[in-house]
Image (cartoon, rainbow, N blue to C red):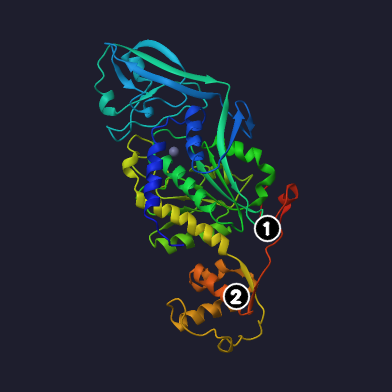
Amino acid sequence: MSRRAPSRGQDMLAFAAQLYPICRSISGAGVRHTLKLIRERIPLRLHEVPSGTQAFDWQVPLEWNIDDACVLDPHGQRVVDFKAHNLHIVSYSEPISMDLPLAELKTRLHAHASHPDWIPYRTSYYRRNWGFCLPRRQLDTLAEGRYGVRIASSLARGSLSYGEFVLPGRRREEVLLFTHICHPSLANDNTSGMAVATALAAWLAQTPRRYSYRLVFAPGTIGSLVWLKRNEKSLARIRYGLVLGLLGDSAPLTYKCSRQGQSEIDRLAPYALRGLDPGSRTLPFEPYGYDERQLCSPGFNLPIGRLTRSVNDGYPQYHSSGDDLGILSAASLEQSLEACQRIVQAIEDSRHYINVLPKGEPRLGKRGLYGTVGGQSPAARELARLWVLNQSDGAHSLLGIAERSQLPIDELTTIAAELTAAKLLRLKADPKPARGRSAVQSPRRSRAKR
Ligand code: ZN
């Protein structure tokens, strides 16, 4: 799992740079353009959900598109120009053309609270509004006079777009990977997540796998709510999941637990991250963040954590023009992708075995199972064999054995294969996959309610 191709990080960085200038929002041309670029790399299935569609307590809003926006100073000069940076416009600003005095205009202007040179990121999806964002330094220099505001946008019945990439495995049970695609020119949040998720999908597609994998690229909040609404009957298939985001900055790899806190992904992900970076962090669940807010709401309570580096609002440039491509690095993106791959591999490897000679220790010597293999000392190898044999009563997965023995799961996987070949171990059959609606009552998962 530690194969490293340095160009992968560079490729993700280049893709993030390609996605960065697009003016995304929770609907409209920017999201479609983004999905089109992702689709050039992986076979994404596109979905359009009409405005007005109900998703639990929420509704798909009108579709927003924008061609141009500016503030004109008293001399008619464009002093705030959407064409220069798409963060200058409050996302979902309604169309407007009017002139007004500076004092009145200022009630519509937003500057960053602490950094005078950054443009803040502001949205108003669910309340009709308009406004501009600009650096504090510029705001403070605006002279008195009458200003013009021109916003060539549209709010009209249309649809919300999202993309889905499904890789059927040998089991119908699924690993759900979710990333938001609604932020305009912000690099770590969220071009990094899109770049890593796209690369992960391409990697997953190379090899047939035990579990089925589903990657969803959707606008934050309303996108996951719509997805949950449309997939409510098949949620019981989800055995593991990750929300992916903020994966390109220099903060350490961070896993945020699911609401369940003790689900298998909550044990497995921190374990996989520690193997890659001893400085990685695990954080408890909190009802703040990205789409885990919906996926882990009590009515779903899915076993889905979040893989991130910085947490939201956890770095100074968060939600401002300071979150530009300069804070991404190929090495961080590469390591984030590798973290995803290790988690996937741990999910695939965490199987249950049964010791077929459980009464006493089997004699390893007469089966040729002593000696140095793969550079390990015979003692270490033997200890790993003893752990696997001792714990393989069908109740303990390789993950559980790895946790208890403090041995790497990939090493235990190799040992289990070797012991299986020696007819000392047999693989416990996977439980029959959950199917359709009846799966809702599956005892495998504890669900708060349906
Ligand atoms: Zn954000």
Residue visible at 43% across and 40% down in the picture: 190
Label 1 beta carbon less than 8 Å to ligand 1: no
**Which residue is at the front of the view, 300 or 235?**
235
Quarter of the figure that contains the C terminus: top right
Dot 1 or dot 2: first in sequence order is: 2
Crowding at dot 2, Cα within 10 Å, few <14 / some 14-19 / many 20+, comes out as many
Are the residues tagged 1 and 2 within 8 Å (C-beta)? no
Q: Secondary structure at mark 1?
A: loop
What is the quadrant of residue 277 in the picture? bottom left
Is residue 125 placed above or below 74 in the rendered structure?
Answer: below
Quadrant where ligand 1 appears = top left
Position in image of residue 11 (x %, y %) = 39, 47
Q: Is residue 346 visible?
A: yes
Tag shown at residue 444: 1
Classify residue 174 as left or right of residue 11: right
Percent of width and height locating residue 248: 38, 47
Residue type indicated by callout 1: Arg
Give the residue displayed 62% in from the left and 33% down from the top: 57
Using residue 450 as the reference point, say whether residue 194 is left or right of it: left
Q: Residue at x 56, y 36 (%)?
A: 162
Task: Say which residue label 2 marks.
Answer: 391
51 sits left or right of 87 in the view = right
Q: Is residue 262 visible?
A: no
**In the image, what residue type sits under mark 2?**
Gln
Q: CA distance from mark 1 to mark 2?
A: 21 Å
How far across and how far down the image is residue 331, in percent? Answer: 35, 52
Which is more toward the observer, 107 or 397? 397
